[in-house]
Image (cartoon, rainbow, N blue to C red):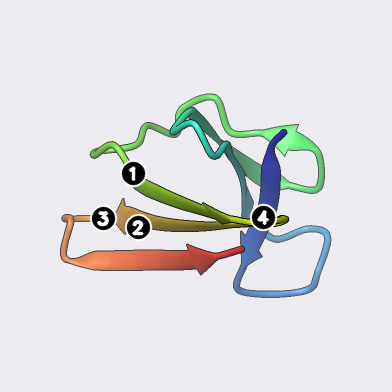
Amino acid sequence: TCFEAFWTFSQKKSDPYWEFNLSPDGKWNLYAFSSYRHRNLNFKIDSIPEIESKTEENTTTIIARIPFGNGKSNLKLYF
């Protein structure tokens, strides 16, 4: 099972965005796009995201801390 999240600063298809794939077992992948479905192959992530998962009964919660830029900014995703 994988959780997907998409992050952008705009809703225009011509603007860049990121796709995050996060798994409860800690596996992850990040794809950068320069515009809709056009991969940015020059994008490199500086640091590895911290992924924490909790499973209770029928619910799994994933918290991902994803560093950006110089590592001082974090994107936190809760699923």
Give percent across and percent down for residue 32.
Answer: 57, 40
Q: Secondary structure at mark 1?
A: loop
Instruction: Determine the CA span between mark 1 and mark 2.
Output: 6 Å
Q: What crowding class fits label 4: few (fewer than 14 Cα within 10 Å), some (14-19), or many (20 or more)? A: some
Earlier along the polypeptide chain: callout 3 or callout 4? Answer: 4
Relative to 66, 17 lies left or right: right
Q: Which mark is residue 65?
A: 2
Tell which of 31 and 15 is nearer to you. Answer: 31
Q: Secondary structure at mark 3?
A: loop
Mark in front: 3 vs 4: 4
Tell which of 36 and 5 is nearer to you. Answer: 5
Instruction: Determine the CA span between mark 4 and mark 1.
Output: 14 Å
Q: Which residue is mark 4?
A: 5
Q: Which residue is mark 3?
A: 69
- The quarter of the image holding the C terminus is bottom right
Q: Which residue is mark 1?
A: 49
| Residue at (81% x, 48% y) in the render | 36
